[in-house]
Amino acid sequence: MATDLTGGLSPEREYVYERCPEVAGTRDAVNVWLEEDRGAFGMRIGVEAAAPKWDAHEIWLDIAFADGRVISLRDEGATHSPLGPDGKPTILGAGPLQFRCVEPFRRWSVSFRGSAPEITAQNLIDEVMPADAPMRAVEFDIEMTMAAPPWVPGSLLPEAGKILSGGEQGEFMSPRYEQLFRAAGTLRVGEKTVSFGGNGLRIRRQGYRKFEGFWGHCWQSALFPSGKAFGYNIYPPRPDGQPSYAEGFVFDGEGPLKPARIVQAPWMTKLRTSGDDVPLVLETTDGRRVEVAGTSFANTRSRGSAVLPPDFPIVQQAHVRYRWDGEETVGMMERSSTPDKFES
């Protein structure tokens, strides 16, 4: 069975804005989660452009090593021209960081030339940025080859689509899609350079996004060596008893994504640097039960953005070793919970 890597989406969905949108709060963003295939490190890389400030975009970079070190940068950088070699708006870049759409829904690249402080995962959990954190020269060039159709949240389950189209919960999600990929590249930190392969998840967001009132989520996704994959996102039960967004998929290595509902998700109740047991259970709409075991090998805590409201949930961003029917891989996980949900 052939796989349509566009998922039926127009190639223009991959293009970036050529100029600042008129509506304040409108965002144009590319974010990537990437795991080195042996679990030596995980990366989260992002460029976030937000109207009305368009002359400088936000830079997000975390390179989390399994030994607890983290290269962590939050900054703003001068905006790159959006026009690629073919004259189309395929580049989203800021300062030392640049994403480029090489072929819509098939190939992307990301590069970085700069420096960033080296801290620890425990520093992030404790929300302590050491004043004497050493600066490290960082360079990387990574090629991303898409390996599954994109998932547009709200497109797979009717009840999920209804919730996202109904107002606030859709504004939390914002117009977006995500796509799993294989990666190959080089990474230099200080004097050490490594070539690596890995897996990842690319998120393309373009439109208005709301942060006020968000109360948490659990989001996991991974691609396995055989080509099979899973992904889901779920919000916690609402205090008012109304339905919360919940939707997932299973991919068999070819064909379309298969819709799935979340039977079990590992809600976050504590913060630690690694070793969280994070199993999940999905059930496809045709009745197949999928049980995936997982253990995190590098955890960070999301930090530093002036746009977040003071009551925003605590956010963990992690990289996980997953096991499914005897097959192993590495993938992503992001969770958030309000402080009252944490164990004392």
Image (cartoon, rainbow, N blue to C red):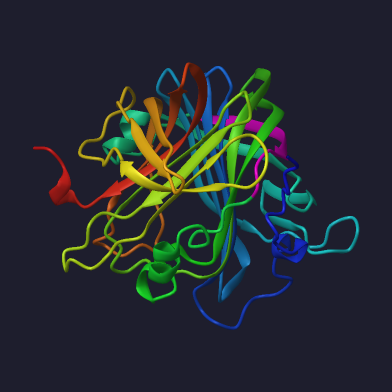
In this view, the residue in front, 43 or 250, is 250
| View extreme (front): residue | 286
In this view, the residue in front, 278 or 291, is 291
The relative height of residue 152 versus residue 165 in the rendered view (above or below) is: above
Q: Locate residue 34 relative to residue 70 in the image: left or right.
A: right
Image quarter hosting the N terminus: top right
| View extreme (right): residue | 86
The relative height of residue 238 versus residue 253 in the rendered view (above or below) is: below
Q: Residue at x 67, y 23 (%)?
A: 197
| View extreme (left): residue | 344
In the image, the segment drawn in magenta is 135-149
The relative height of residue 179 versus residue 312 in the rendered view (above or below) is: above
Residue 113 located within the stretch drawn in magenta: no
Q: Locate residue 325 relative to residue 116 in the image: left or right.
A: left
Image quarter hosting the C terminus: top left
Locate residue 272: give its quadrant.
top left
In this view, the residue in front, 344 or 122, is 344
The majority secondary structure of the magenta stretch comes to: strand
Locate residue 119: give its quadrant.
top left
Q: Residue at x 38, y 69 (%)?
A: 163
Q: Locate residue 129 relative to residue 48 in the image: left or right.
A: left
Q: Position of residue 89 (x, y in %)?
A: 79, 64
Residue 136 located within the stretch drawn in magenta: yes
